[in-house]
Image: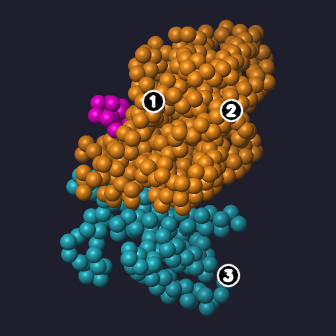
Chain colours: A orange, B cyan
Amino acid sequence: MTQQIILYPLLLQLLLAILLMFFWNKIKAQRVISMVGSAIHLVVSIVVFAYIWNNGTQTLQAGSWEAPFGITFIADTFAITMVLLTSIAGFAVSVFSAGSVISGRLKFGYFPIYHFLLLGLTGAFLTGDIFNLYVWFEIIIISSFVLITIGGEKAQLEGAVKYFTLNFLASMIFLTAIAVLYGLTGSLNMADLANKVAAVENRALVEITAILFLIGFGIKSALFPLYYWLPASYHTPPSAVSAIFGGLLTKVGVYALIRVFTLIFVEDVFLDQILLVLAIFTLFSGALGALVQNNIRKIFSYLIISHIGYMIIGLGMYTEVAIAGGVFYLIHDIMIKTNLFMVSGLIYRIKGSNSMRALGGFYANYPKLSLLIFIPLFSLIGIPPLSGFWPKISLITATFNSESYWSLAAIIFASFLTLVVIAKLWAEVFWKDAQEIPERPRFRYFHKVKNIKRVEMVVPIIFLSLVTLYIGFGAEHVQTLSARIASELMDSQQYIDAVLNNSQITE
Amino acid sequence: MKTLILKTASAYLLPVLLVFSVFILLRGHYLPGGGFVGGLIAAIAFVLHAFANGLKNTKGLLQFHPGFLMPVGLGLAFLSGLAPVLGFDDPFMTGLWLPYDVPVLGSVGSALFFDIGVYFVVIGVTLTIIFTISESA
């Protein structure tokens, strides 16, 4: 059974989704199953993570079909870390959904679809087959289309159309890239591809395929100049949905980029330059976009884009230190962005508005909550002991080592812009005098709902803030983890051996 | 559509089409067919019945909401994948086969149950979509 352990998080999500479908009309039961199930999933992921940490990379050939032919599942440290982060964010958002999403939305199958989304994410992280990766991406986007449109408000549908169009285009480009790659090498297994792509003589076609992958994943991870669907859509669905989208959906694109460009298309200076330039522009354009927005959730949407740049800069410099920094930033960012969208949801429930100008007096009225929200907001900027600070050290060290001073300037300038944006937000929402916001009839205000709902809304924020504090104050552990991930990524031979040799043993 | 010919024919067509869909489902492992096509044919049988006799009668015939077939089918497919994990410690989705042939069905294995799962999901999805559209139309 031990060899199968890597598939347990995936199977558990599938089981949860199916179980929830049996309770289609019973929303109360769904809430409980989803919360308990996500908690179990969290525990299982921790166990699997500990197992991989102690025993190294594990592989599993689904259906016992051997490696280059069947579908391989592989859990190296990077994949299993992402699965663990998915389960942490998944648990928090599951509880937050139970508290904040109105039952009018829940009755259209919110929770089953939500767990299908988590299933897709877990699968995308664990798979070792590039076509299977595409299939998991499809599961993710189909579930996300449903989640983004549930409720059917006008603004929501408008956002969903933009989201749908661009993501669909990205999937098509991704599929085309896979087709070209398959035509070149006759293989879909990523480890096998790594060997075969290196041997292809038509380098120009390989380069074009790499660019196709870059465009496909670039749209999904909201890279410059393909990011405009994100701020147009992420503020429209309920904040619980935005939280899981903001935390994980763009990051799965980043994960795929890192995976593909460290395993299959390696040693390509031209591509690294492109990645660096794109990352620098992403950092600037996201931060500048955030500067002019008034809606809190739009600000956070633009900040997602901006901070994707940090991870891609790490990939673009392509040294071990830089990738470690990028991966550390990825870990930090998933927790923070999930938390921030939940915070925006909480503010919305308390005041009935997300407009920065209309809000105010939060610190005077809710001092404890304000202190809680302080943690994710200032971790995002990277005030020293908090979590955003540590990955930037690795990244800045790496820019000095590879003498790319433009990247250095971009990293520092984007951090500075983030500081300005968050300081402005803090001054407007928390310190400014309270404004009169006309009371909305039939709106479920925070002070009107039952105690249990309030707990369900605040506890996930506390939970994720604690995780963030751990990333900040236990940075040494996370740094060890990301250094190990980076060394595994740079030494792709280890990954290839794990997939291909393993199958020879089972013969 | 209220025509006597269609109404009379549909009473005979429904069981024939259902049997045919099961036939297509069973032959699908090595030959063209399988759970997906079989499920579509079974769904067509009910849609034809609904055309001839009205949606209400077809729903009465089914007795439960077709959407219920979705989790049932998914669960069946999931269990067929899980069986090798639980029973034999083989990787997920490994095919398990009975050592002897079953009369009529031929060789029976976990793949058959996966296909039956697909069959139910397809019926459930198709009928839910078509019933919802014809209700709101």
Residue B37 in sight in this render: yes
Pick the quarter of the image with the N terminus of chain A. top left
The image quadrant of residue B80 is bottom left
Q: In this view, does B116 lie to the left or right of B11?
A: left
Residue beneath disc 1: A486
Chain on which label 2 sits: A
Label 3 close to label 2 by CB (< 8 Å): no
Residue beneath disc 2: A277
Residue type (three-letter) at the residue carrying disc 1: Ala
Residue type (three-letter) at the residue carrying disc 2: Val
Image position of A490 with respect to B38: above or below:
above
Chain on which label 1 sits: A
Q: What stretch is highlighted in magenta?
A: A44-57
Q: Which residue is drawn at 44% across and 73% down?
A: B34
Residue A505: image x %, image y %?
A: 24, 51
Element assignment for label 1? helix
Label 1 close to label 2 by CB (< 8 Å): no
Q: Residue at x 45, y 26 (%)?
A: A482
Residue B46: image x %, image y %?
A: 53, 75
Element assignment for label 3? loop
Discs 1 and 2 lie in a common subunit: yes
Q: Is residue A12 magenta?
A: no
Residue beneath disc 3: B1
Residue A146 in sight in this render: no
Tell me the CA gap for discs 1 and 3. 66 Å
Q: In this view, does A312 lie to the left or right of A226?
A: left
Counting residues from the N terminus, which is met first, the one under dot 1 or under dot 2?
2
